Image (spheres, rainbow, N blue to C red):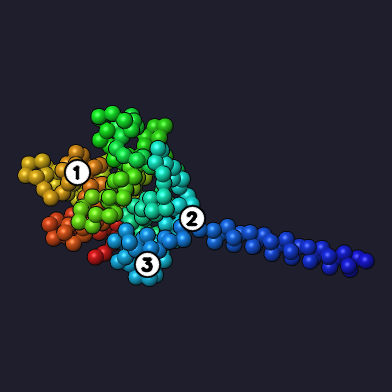
Amino acid sequence: MVVVLQIFFVLALIIVIILFVFRINKVKTTSRLPENYKGILTDYIKFYRQLDEEGKEKFEKRADHFLSAVKITGVNAMVEDIDRLLIAAGAIIPVYAISDWQYINLHEVLVYPGTFNLDFDQAGSDRTVTGMVGTGAMQYVMIITKWELRQGFIDNHTTRNTAIHEFVHLIDKMDGTMDGVPEIILEKKYVPQWKRMMESTIRQMKTYGSDIDSYGATNTTEFFAVISEYFFEQPELLNANHPELYQMLENIYKIKG
């Protein structure tokens, strides 16, 4: 009888272990990616199209992880599969070459249908904001407009991409300050040089104009976000027109052309 009970106990223990392992594996293999994710990424994400098969698989896994970690909510807007994937792409592209990156300063992305003002109002004539990284009560929130989100990936001839812009702000903010110097990923030896380059380029933009979006001349915070959009959207053009900036951004993002 004792032997029978021992055998029963062992079998029961084995069954419990099998069920536990099955549950863990099921959790691990649950994907947040839509069924047609490969088609959407291929059609809309130029960065993704240029990767080899191993690189694409890495991108997909990073997108899946992002979507499982960050909530995406529509505010008077319907969030579709394409919107979720474009937001994930905007998050991954700047940190693709940086292993084990986590946006610990982001919990939720709010998707608005169109522009809004600094009080987050979606009505009125003073609506000029297309994206924003929250502060204060909105500390862990990003807001992005659905139209600008899509336009940034549909138009392959522009240097602008609002999603990348806002995620670059989050990267910048990760060291505790938003000042255009992403010290969490920029080697310390490059910091003084990068500050000088930003300040001198902003002066040139204000004095002579530039092919760099004029919003980048607002301050060093916006310059870093704007020039990063340029770097990822039109790298060949940036390298041709501003080779020193291009080389520094390669150092920042660990991407070699």
Q: Which residue is the extreme one toward the left?
A: 208
Q: Secondary structure at mark 3?
A: helix
User: Hey, what amino acid is under mark 3?
Assistant: Gly
Pointers 3 and 2 in contact (C-beta within 8 Å)? no
Q: Which structural element holds mark 2?
A: loop
N-terminal label among 2 and 1: 2
Q: CA distance from mark 1 to mark 3?
A: 31 Å
Amino acid, disc 1: Gly
Residue identified by numbered label 3: 55
155 sits left or right of 102 in the view: left
| C-alpha distance separating marks 2 and 1 | 35 Å
Look at mark 2 in the image and give the residue it sits on: 32
Name the quarter where the C terminus is drawn: bottom left
x, y percent for residue 46: 29, 61
Total marks in image: 3
Tell me the quarter of the image containing the N terminus. Answer: bottom right
Looking at the picture, how far across and down is residue 189, in whole percent?
25, 53
Front position in the image: 45 or 170 = 45
